[in-house]
Amino acid sequence: QVQLVESGGGSVQAGGSLRLSCVVSGYGFFSTACMDWFRQAPGKERGGVARISNGGGVTLYADSVKGRFTISRDNANTTVYLQMNDLKPEDTAMYYCATVGRCGWTSITATDVRYWGQGTQVTVSS
C-alpha cells in the first residue's frame, strides 16, 4: 500500500520559513518518479507548487513561489522536501505531496498525479 505522509506545517508570521517533509512508503518506483507539491486554500482549486525530477536535477516552480520555495529529495530515505522562505499570507493553504505518473516540464497539474498524501496545513499571518 502506497502511503505519503507530510509533516512540517504550522503557523508562522509573514517573512518566516517552514520546511515541509513527505515520507513515501510502499512505492517501489520512488527513485524513478517525479514528485510534486500542491496546495489548496479554502474555496480554491488545488494547484501545483513545485516538481522535482527523479534524480533531483530538474525542478519546476509555480510563478508565485519562484525564488522563495525550494523542492528537494532524498531517494535513499524516500523523502521529498519543500523549503519555504519569505512566506506570505497568500501562501496559507493545505499542502500536499504527490507522486507523478507522467512527468512533464511545462506545468504542474493534478492530472499527472498518481498518489496523494493527506496534507499538512500552513498558515501565514500578516
Image (cartoon, helix red, strand yellow):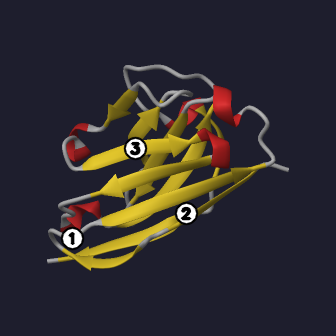
Cβ atoms under marks 3 and 2 closer than 8 Å:
no
- Neighbours of disc 1 within 10 Å: few (<14), some (14-19), many (20+): some
Which residue lies under the disc numbered 3?
71
In the displayed structure, would residue 49 be above or below residue 22?
above
Label annotation for residue 16: 1
Residue, disc 2: 119
* Residue 120 in the image: above or below residue 109: below
Q: Nearer the viewer, mark 1 or mark 2?
A: 1
Upstream in the sequence, badge 3 or badge 2?
Answer: 3
Q: Residue 16: which quarter of the image?
A: bottom left
Q: Position of residue 58 (x, y in %)?
A: 41, 25
As helix, strand or loop, the secondary structure at mark 1 comes to loop
Verify CB contact (< 8 Å) between mark 3 and mark 1: no
Q: Is residue 85 above or below residue 2?
A: below
Query: Is residue 19 toward the left or the right of residue 114 in the image?
Result: left
Residue 84 seen in the current view:
yes
The quarter of the displayed image where residue 117 is located: bottom right
Circle on res. 6: none
Foreground mark, 3 or 2?
3
Residue located at (47% from left, 31% from top): 56
Is residue 46 visible in the rendered structure shown here? no
Of 79 and 50, the residue lying toward us:
79
Give x and y (percent) for residue 52: 46, 33
Q: Is residue 46 left or right of residue 70?
A: right
Q: Name the residue at 51% across, 59% down.
A: 21
